């Protein structure tokens, strides 16, 4: 009787198998609306780096133009009086698995063309190529196209890089450093001499303002107490959560440590100094008999300003003053912020071309030393926080401080309750938008603009968050940049910051998700990084594929210094197959199918994972089960009610023996069975 019953059960299965296994071609085993987010929980320990994001399967032969290195895209400002020449530089990277050799790269820009040869490029490496000089004319658009023409390249979609550039008339800039300090702050005392050293070396093109804060230790700093409101306003403007803290041109924020100064300050300083600006500014101080200082400020808008909220901020600064009473050993303080006029909001300036003159008169406080008071004025776009230009009324340095040799390895002093009053002006930062219909090999090397095109940074507290970092590169692909969260200086413990990828379509479940990361532990503090996958375009991220913290996150030896990975050996590499990510029943796409259907599993034969897709045209009671050749139930993949849609899941046969298996879909009055073969 048992044999009869078994035969009765197997016969329909076999009939169904032969009925429905007519050749239909391979079923498309791809999913759309895939997005990935990197989530870092700050522990005020040490920096966490991410680089070389990959989603897909590498081609054997594949080179790409990674970046145009010395011609910024979009609108720029030239401080040359007329035409000028640039020798364009690009980076070419081999993202294939074998060596590429003997191919050309070409750059076109209108009538300009230049061709160079790359002799050999091993897998994962890159090379900078310099083209012939290109003539740039102000007010004339430059549409650049650069491409590689390797005949063996299997992925032509990334061979070409296009960029629009326009140079408008501009002028040279000065650079502003706004530093935050306090006389009870031990790390401030050890770092300040390095800022002094850098300032004196670049006095003519550098303005410095130093604000004093109310922490750490007793709230008794006389330079803070002299103007608590405006000092606090600038702390909150930049979301300063620890001191010492250096902010350059409102663009490079929370610089720490200050040593070595020509690296920590010098690198962003030269980048800013060599970037033209559409606004010129000149400040002249004069004394009116008595206790009044008159400052005449000329603002020259050379080219129309982009949309924004441009404010002229005028500051009374005391060059040097001796105080005693703090606990960090400092007695000589420089460039002390005294007051901002007319208030912290500053003065709105026009955005149209023209010269605008402002005269500010302010009374010298009785406690200020008259001969040491001077004016620093700067123009800032409050939408982006970028300082467009600055100038000061003092033309000489007064002293030539020399930095000491004390090692700087202590962390900034954290501001109590910093998370409670931080502003939220730039919580969401999105890269330039691009078409999200992608296929093939998807990657992001973080070598270009940041956030990358269609990627997003979510920064809930508007404090430190994911930022571009030049000087550390993961080993998967050559380059010089990565992205990081500067947890070393991030005083808001427990704050979570997010880096979210663009949306990817046509992702095969045999593809892999890969990336590099780097971290070193600062003893007593713990960072955490999670990587999560969305299958609905970033609405939710239900699949966590990476979750490490503390020592398990570390890729390099612990240190109390500001961690920067020094080589490939201090990076980790993570890889996971997408078929291992999407292991539950998952609805993909928004389409409503016209009828029920069960697709052939892919791959088939498989080892050990295969994917199963099916269609439900209306809300139905659904079961999806796997049987062996004896009709015994092996697995129930789903048993419940599902809404109309297209669904996909994975079946893992790692615990099964090689052989034939059947999977069966039952939904309302519909049922269908297909065969799959496990081969080990």
Image (spheres, rainbow, N blue to C red):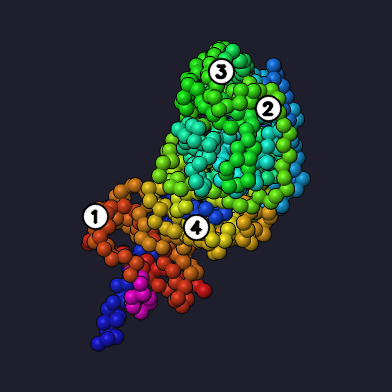
Report the side of 61 relative to 19 (left or right): right
Report the side of 304 relative to 395 (left or right): left
- Provide the secondary structure element on which disc 4 rests: strand
First in sequence, mark 4 or 1: give its number.
4
Q: CA distance from mark 4 to mark 2?
A: 41 Å
- Quarter holding the N terminus is bottom left
Residue 485 pos. (x, y %)? 54, 48
Report the side of 8 relative to 248 (left or right): left
Tag 1 residue: 619
Q: Is residue 363 above or below residue 14?
A: above
First in sequence, mark 1 or 2: give its number.
2
Tag 3 residue: 291
- Residues 663 and 440: in front is 440
Q: Residue at x 53, y 16 (%)?
A: 361
Q: Nearer the viewer, mark 4 or mark 1?
A: 4
- Residues 294 and 498: in front is 294
Q: Kindly check if marks 4 and 1 are in contact, taking CB atoms under 8 A apart as contact.
A: no
Q: CA distance from mark 1 to mark 2?
A: 69 Å
Tag 2 residue: 205
Disc number placed over residue 516 in the picture, else none: none
Q: CA distance from mark 3 to mark 1?
A: 82 Å
Q: Is residue 186 above or below residue 612?
A: above
Please report the bounds of the magenta region as a residue range: 625-635
Tag 4 residue: 528
Q: Is residue 414 above or below residue 287?
A: below
First in sequence, mark 4 or 3: give its number.
3
First in sequence, mark 3 or 1: give its number.
3
First in sequence, mark 2 or 3: give its number.
2
């Amino acid at each position: 009787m048992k044999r009869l019953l078994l035969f009765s059960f197997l016969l329909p299965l076999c009939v169904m198998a032969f009925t429905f296994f007519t050749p239909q071609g391979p079923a498309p085993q791809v999913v759309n609306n895939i997005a990935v987010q990197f989530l870092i929980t700050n522990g005020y320990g040490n920096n966490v780096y991410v680089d070389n994001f990959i989603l897909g399967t590498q081609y054997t032969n594949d080179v790409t133009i990674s970046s145009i290195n010395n011609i910024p895209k979009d609108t720029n400002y030239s401080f040359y009086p007329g035409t000028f020449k640039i020798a364009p530089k690009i980076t070419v990277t081999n993202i294939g698995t074998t060596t590429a050799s003997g191919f050309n790269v070409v750059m076109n820009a209108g009538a300009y063309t230049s061709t160079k040869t790359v002799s050999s490029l091993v897998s994962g490496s890159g090379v900078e190529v310099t083209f012939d000089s290109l003539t740039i004319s102000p007010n004339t658009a430059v549409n650049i196209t650069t491409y590689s023409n390797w005949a063996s390249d299997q992925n032509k979609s990334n061979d070409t890089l296009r960029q629009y550039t326009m140079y408008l008339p501009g002028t040279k800039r000065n650079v502003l450093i706004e530093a935050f300090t306090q006389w009870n702050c031990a790390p401030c005392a050890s770092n300040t001499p390095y800022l002094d050293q850098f300032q004196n070396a670049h006095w003519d093109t550098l303005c410095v303002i130093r604000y004093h804060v109310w922490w750490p230790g007793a709230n008794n700093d006389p330079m803070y107490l002299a103007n608590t409101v405006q000092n606090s306003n600038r702390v909150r403007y930049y979301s300063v959560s620890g001191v010492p803290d250096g902010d350059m041109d409102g663009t490079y924020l929370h610089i720490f440590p200050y040593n070595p100064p020509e690296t920590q300050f010098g690198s962003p300083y030269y980048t800013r100094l060599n970037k033209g600006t559409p606004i010129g500014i000149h400040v002249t101080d004069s004394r009116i008999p008595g206790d009044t200082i008159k400052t005449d400020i000329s603002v020259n808008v050379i080219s129309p300003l982009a949309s924004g909220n441009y404010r002229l901020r005028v500051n009374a600064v005391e060059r040097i003053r001796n105080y005693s009473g703090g606990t960090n050993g400092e007695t000589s303080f420089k460039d002390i912020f005294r007051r901002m006029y007319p208030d912290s909001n500053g003065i709105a300036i026009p955005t149209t071309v023209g010269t605008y003159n402002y005269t500010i008169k302010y009374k010298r406080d009785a406690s200020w030393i008259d001969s040491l008071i001077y004016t620093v004025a700067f123009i800032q776009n409050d939408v982006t926080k970028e300082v467009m230009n600055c100038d000061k009324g003092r033309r000489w340095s007064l002293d030539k401080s020399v930095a000491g040799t004390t090692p700087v390895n202590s962390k900034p002093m954290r501001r109590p309750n910093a998370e409670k009053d931080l502003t939220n002006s730039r919580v969401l930062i999105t890269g330039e938008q691009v078409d999200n219909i992608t296929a093939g090999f998807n990657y992001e090397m973080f070598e270009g603009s940041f956030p990358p095109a269609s990627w997003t940074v979510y920064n809930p507290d508007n404090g430190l968050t994911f930022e571009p970092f030049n000087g550390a590169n993961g080993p998967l692909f050559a380059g010089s940049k990565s992205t990081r969260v500067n947890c070393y200086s991030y005083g808001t413990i427990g704050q979570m910051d997010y880096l979210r990828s663009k949306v990817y379509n046509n992702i095969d479940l045999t593809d892999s998700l890969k990336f590099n990361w780097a971290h070193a532990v600062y003893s007593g503090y713990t960072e955490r990084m999670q990587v999560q996958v969305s299958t609905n375009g970033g609405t939710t991220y239900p699949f966590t594929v990476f979750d490490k913290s503390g020592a398990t996150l570390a890729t390099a030896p612990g240190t109390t210094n500001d961690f920067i990975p020094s080589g490939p050996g201090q990076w980790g590499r993570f890889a996971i197959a997408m078929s291992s990510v999407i292991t539950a029943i998952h609805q993909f796409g928004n389409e409503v199918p016209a009828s029920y259907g069960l697709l052939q599993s892919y791959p088939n034969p498989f080892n050990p994972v295969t994917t199963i897709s099916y269609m439900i045209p209306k809300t139905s009671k659904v079961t999806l089960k796997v049987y062996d050749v004896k009709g015994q139930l092996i697995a129930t993949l789903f048993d419940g009610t599902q809404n109309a849609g297209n669904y996909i899941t994975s079946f893992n046969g790692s615990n099964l023996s090689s052989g034939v298996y059947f999977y069966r879909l039952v939904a309302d009055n519909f049922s269908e069975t297909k065969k799959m073969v496990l081969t080990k």
